[in-house]
Image: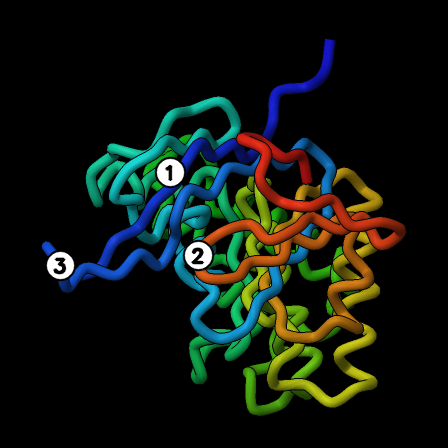
Amino acid sequence: MSAEPIVETRDIRKLYGSGEASIAALDGVSILVEPNSFVAIMGPSGSGKSTLMHILGCLDRPSSGSYWLAGEEVSQLDREQLAMLRNRRIGFVFQSYNLLARTTALDNVLLPLLYSRNGKTTPEERLARARTALEAVGLGDREAHRPHELSGGQQQRVAIARALINDPALIMADEPTGNLDSTSSLEIMQLLEELHSRGRTIIMVTHSAEWAAHAQRIIHLRDGQVESIEDNRRAVPGGTPERRA
């Protein structure tokens, strides 16, 4: 029996505006992302990739259609429920790192645990988890450094450690190399590949075909629809109701 998908969407649509002036940012997107997958989402400006990431990351809700995250139907959850689910199930890595400037690497990594409503962990346990996460990204010796004392690549590693702290079902990476030089970008991609090899499920939005090639599958969007899914060896045309990634 196959494992339950981490992500499953069925005919997701997202409309902006109303009536004849409405615009479909997503128009019937159906995908499956299985556990321990590394998936890239690509498409030109206006293709719907940012909208899809916001929905998959539980930052927004679809106008219609269904979305299951790790077996839980989340399409109709309210904002508070979505916020709780994000904290429990999803780790985010953003292009701009989103680190607190005056806060140490260790305390930046700790932030999701401070916002968590799970009161079962002690401060000592939280510190141990944050240190383990920093060690997992190769920054165990940088826990007292603030963002301005770290390179761009190191700041992104701190952001990845923060994404790992709650042991999420899914890591969402939005242009994770967008602010980095080519050397640091390669290091971050190699780190994501390493995390994937350890069993993490990763969905990455990127403009770069070079970095997308590190993923197992590439979902190509155009005009709010899945144009094709590429496994880096062959492309599968869109048009089927559900496609595995």
Q: Position of residue 71 (x, y in %)?
A: 49, 22
Image position of 222 with respect to 59: above or below: below
Q: Amino acid at mark 2?
A: Gly
Image position of 145 with respect to 2: above or below: below
Residue that badge 2 annotates: 224
Q: Position of residue 80 (x, y in %)?
A: 22, 42
Dots 2, 1 in contact, CB < 8 A: no
Q: Amino acid at mark 1?
A: Leu
Dots 3, 1 in contact, CB < 8 A: no
Image position of 118 with respect to 132: above or below: above
* Location of residue 74 (image quadrant): top left
The label on residue 85 is 1
Query: Measuring 66% from the left and 49% from the top, which residue is drawn there?
Result: 202
Q: Amino acid at mark 3?
A: Glu
Q: Quadrant where the N terminus lies?
A: top right
Q: Report, in whole angstroms, how far the alpha carbon at label 2 lies from the one at label 1.
A: 25 Å
* Location of residue 163 (image quadrant): bottom right
**Residue count near mark 3 (Cα–Cα under 10 Å), binned few <14, some 14–19, many ≥20:** few
Which mark sits nearer the N-terminus, 2 or 3?
3
Query: Measuring 38% from the left and 26% from the top, which residue is drawn there?
Result: 73
Query: Measuring 81% from the left and 56% from the top, which residue is drawn there?
Result: 193
Tell me if 206 is positioned left or right of 22 in this view.
right
Q: Report, in whole angstroms, how far the alpha carbon at label 3 lies from the one at label 1.
A: 34 Å
Q: Nearer the viewer, mark 2 or mark 3?
A: 3
Residue that badge 3 annotates: 20
Q: Nearer the viewer, mark 3 or mark 1?
A: 3
Q: Position of residue 214 (x, y in %)?
A: 81, 61
